[in-house]
Amino acid sequence: MALRNIRTMGDECLNKVCKEVKEINDRTRTLIEDMIDTMYEANGVGLAAPQVGILKRIVVIDVGEGPIVMVNPTILETSGEQTGQEGCLSVPNKAGIVTRPNYVKARAFNENMEEYEIEGTELLARAICHELDHLDGHLYVEKVEGELMEATYDEDEE
Ligand code: ZN
């Protein structure tokens, strides 16, 4: 298990548009494994490669049903709306209210570069939107309605 340092707001990596992954090699596989370890260690439900300083279009998500690896993800369809609290491992100890779609359908590649589609509602839909924003250099704080709040100790972070 290898942990990577999570970059925090102010680090320029978090404001960059990430590059498409052309092939999965051993380095990419190690990166994906490290991202999953780092996400679990930090009790997050998602982590994007730029959060560990790698400007590639890779995210990992686990909303409690096992890890999901998304390489070169794109959102195909969204519907509905949910408004709720969100946090980010790159914005430690903060939370804010963000409105996201309540349903998301996305296409991505897995760690073997096999294409798949995924549908999610509620937390999974929120996590997909949040993590994909990272790949285009956006943080949820840009979308917060009202003020950023101090997160209480037990809150889920994304
Ligand atoms: Zn985040």
Image (spheres, rainbow, N blue to C red):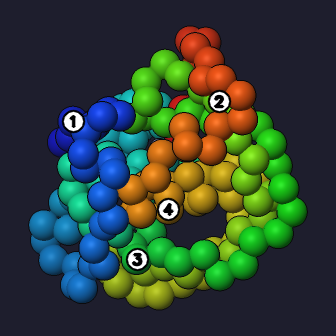
Q: Are marks 4 and 1 in contact (CB under 8 Å)?
A: no
- Badge 4 is on which residue? 132
Residue visible at 56% across and 33% down?
A: 87
Within 10 Å of disc 3 (Cα), the crowding (few <14, some 14-19, many 20+) is many
Question: Considering the image in quadrants, where does the N terminus appear?
Answer: top left
Q: Is mark 3 within 8 Å of ligand 1?
A: no
Name which residue lies at 72% across and 78% down: 77
- The number of discs equals 4
Structural distance between the alpha carbons of marks 1 and 3: 22 Å
Q: Is residue 141 visible?
A: yes
In this rendering, would 25 be left or right of 141?
A: left
Q: CA distance from mark 4 to mark 3?
A: 9 Å
Packing grade of label 2 (10 A; few <14, some 14-19, many >=20) is many
Which residue is the site of mark 3?
A: 72
Secondary structure of the residue carrying tag 2 is strand
Which disc, if any, is residue 40?
none
> Of helix, strand and loop, which one carries label 3?
strand
